[in-house]
Image (cartoon, grey):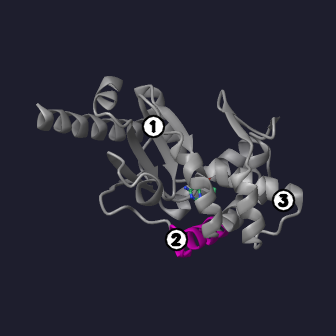
């Protein structure tokens, strides 16, 4: 299947966008694994900038300083983890404080610009699955396949609750639901690259879907689209 992507010249991109806790990250990683493609979790870049800013005492409102932090970002992905400045930051970027700060950092156009080329550098053969908020609209507008993953806010809060409880973190459902709604509003309401489906995106509602079924749906879409593209070429 990877040969299909390579045969079109530019490595093929599957863009998977959606709100927090919609399942897009798990779906994107699963699709990348099945196809042998590279995987970009773009949210982790915003989280790394937020972690770096919190550590350096840079206010989340200081756009210029945050943009410098983003363009100098020294990160590396390895074995499902991520390093910041040579130190493991896999857990550090997942804290609730970093989640909230990442969403605030991400509103700044200069930060988004600084991260653009870093994200596009992940487009390599045999192909890329990229997940985030603006993969299909801004970062990879020419992506061959665009999926917008949704799920109700209640279902997403429930999923997040289970994950946090499993980690031994005590949290209330009400608080989580409020956080998710606040983050959705900030991500969708910002002027720079707001969260919205690309015009040519397929909407995938995962409220009542298992992860495997959702991965299967994206793989089906990939097969149908690449077969159609091959038929057109021959
Ligand atoms: O997907 P995530 O929850 O790890 O993303 C963390 C924050 O980064 C989220 O609040 C929105 C922001 N983000 C963004 O603005 N654009 C992206 N492509 C990915 C994430």
| Residue 54: image tag | 3
Answer with the quarter of the image where residue 219 lies: top left
Residue density around tag 1, few if under 14, some if 14–19, many if 20 or more, within 10 Å:
many
Q: Residue at x 72, y 70 (%)?
A: 63
- Where disc 1 sits, the SS reads strand
Can residue 220 be seen? yes
* 207 on left or right of 228: right
Is the CB atom of the residue marked by disc 3 within 8 angstroms of ligand 1's nearest atom? no
Determine the quadrant in which ligand 1 lies. Answer: bottom right
Circle 1 sits on which residue?
128
Indicate the position of residue 214 as horizontal and vertical percent values.
40, 42
Dot 2, crowdedness within 10 Å: few (<14), some or many (≥20)? some
For the record, the magenta segment spans 178-193
What residue lies at 39% left-to-right and 62% top-to-bottom?
197
**What's the CA distance linking mark 3 and mark 1?**
30 Å
User: In which quadrant is the C terminus drawn?
Assistant: top left
Q: What is the distance, in whole Å, between disc 3 and disc 2 at their CAs?
A: 24 Å
SS state under label 2: helix
Residue at image coords 45%, 37%: 128
Quick check: is 100 in the magenta stretch? Answer: no
Residue 173 appears at what percent x and percent y?
68, 61
Image location of residue 160, percent across then percent down:
64, 52
């Amino acid at each position: 299947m990877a040969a299909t992507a390579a045969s079109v010249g530019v490595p093929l991109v599957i863009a998977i966008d959606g709100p927090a806790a919609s399942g897009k990250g798990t779906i994107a990683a699963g699709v990348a694994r099945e196809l042998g493609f590279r995987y970009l979790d773009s949210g982790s870049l915003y989280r790394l900038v937020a972690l770096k800013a919190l550590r350096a005492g840079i206010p989340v409102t200081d756009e210029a300083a945050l943009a410098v932090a983003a363009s100098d970002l020294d990160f590396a992905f390895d074995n499902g983890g991520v390093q910041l400045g040579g130190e493991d930051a896999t857990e550090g970027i997942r804290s609730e404080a970093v989640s909230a700060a990442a969403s605030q950092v991400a509103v700044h156009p200069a930060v988004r610009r600084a991260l653009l080329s870093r994200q596009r550098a992940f487009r390599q053969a045999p192909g890329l699955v990229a997940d985030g908020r603006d993969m299909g609209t801004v970062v990879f507008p020419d992506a061959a396949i665009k999926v917008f993953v949704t799920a109700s806010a209640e279902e997403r809060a429930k999923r997040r609750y289970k994950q946090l409880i499993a980690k031994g973190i005590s949290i209330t459902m009400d608080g989580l639901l409020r956080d998710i709604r606040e983050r959705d509003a900030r991500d969708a309401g910002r002027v720079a690259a707001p969260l919205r489906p690309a015009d040519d995106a397929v909407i995938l509602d995962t409220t009542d879907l298992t992860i495997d079924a959702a991965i299967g749906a994206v793989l089906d879409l990939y097969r149908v689209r690449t077969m159609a593209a091959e038929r057109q070429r021959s």
